Amino acid sequence: MTVEEMKKRKTELGLTSQMISQMSGVPLGTVQKIFAGTTKAPRRLTIEALERILSHSGPSEMAEDRQAYIQEGISRSENQPRQDCMLRETPAPYDTAVRFDSIAGDHRYTLDDYYALPDERRVELIDGVFYDMAAPDFLHQLILTHLSNQFYECAEQHDMPCEVFQSPCDVRLDRDNYTMVQPDLLVICGRQDYLHMKCLEGAPDLAVDILSPSSRSKDMILKLYKYEKAGVREYWIVDPDHRTVTVHFFDTDDYDPVRYSFHDQIPVRISEGKCSIDFSRIEQRLARYE
């Protein structure tokens, strides 16, 4: 679908750029630049994310994707005070008499809505929009376990003041009332203030997400943008389907992402040359089952 075709489809469906941004996970500024013609060569993944929304037959079908993980919706009030992670000792009770606002509205969910969800419902809240997190498969978990082990071994070997955590760990990325994410793996260095909190306030030093079919566009576009803006120093995107790891190191003014294979030794940039992850060890482990 060309940009002109997407413009036409956008008009036919009566969608605004903000609505498309919320449904696709593509940052609003990027959507606006594409439709305005400012961005001459949009990234393929960005175009694919927009196409998925604009190829729907109508608003009712588009709503199904957003409603799949919330059957009853959420009862909330815009005037409720912000709740910091350190103040939220127990989840708020779940209200079964609830609703889910239309995708055409300007409703934004908050941390109170996030904490009101049942414990078994795993979602991420990004800029007031809920994104479902399906249960990870065993391939995902195998990669995550061995990746976490290597990060931990590296930090221990070099006596680095860093801790390694696996999902689910809540991260209040923007320190606001509208975003709570759960990286698959996160590394925190030189901090202890989070130890008695319900979640991490602010950005981890390093975050890792392992792609799945349902999270691909969110992780590669929306969360990439959010992590960079929030101050995450390094972000790894692991793609099991293509056996690649894309590393984004944001600690430079003009960075280029670097793509590695599952056969490579990948440097951990925040370690300043001390650590690297031998992905061939993980590949060898995966090969046992193929």
Image: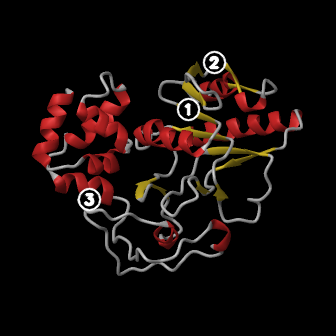
Q: Give the SS element for disc 1.
A: strand
Q: Position of residue 149 (x, y in %)?
A: 75, 38
In the displayed orientation, state which residue is furthest to the left: 12
x and y, in percent, of residue 193 in the image: 77, 59
Residue underneath mark 3? 103
**Secondary structure beneath label 2:** loop
Residue type beneath disc 3: Ile
User: Pointer 2: what residue?
Assistant: 263
- In this rendering, position of residue 112 left or right of residue 76: right
* Mark identifier at residue 238: 1
The percent position of residue 100, horizontal first and vertical second, equals 31, 68
Residue 227 image-quadrant placement: top right
Using a 10 Å C-alpha cutoff, classify the residue at mark 2 as few (fewer than 14 neighbours), some (14 to 19) or many (20 or more).
some
Left or right position of 192 against 3: right
Above or below, 38 relative to 222: above
Q: Earlier in the sequence, mark 1 or mark 3?
A: 3
Q: Is residue 181 above or below residue 227?
A: below
Image side of residue 138 versus residue 251, left or right: left
Q: Nearer the viewer, residue 21 or 63?
A: 21
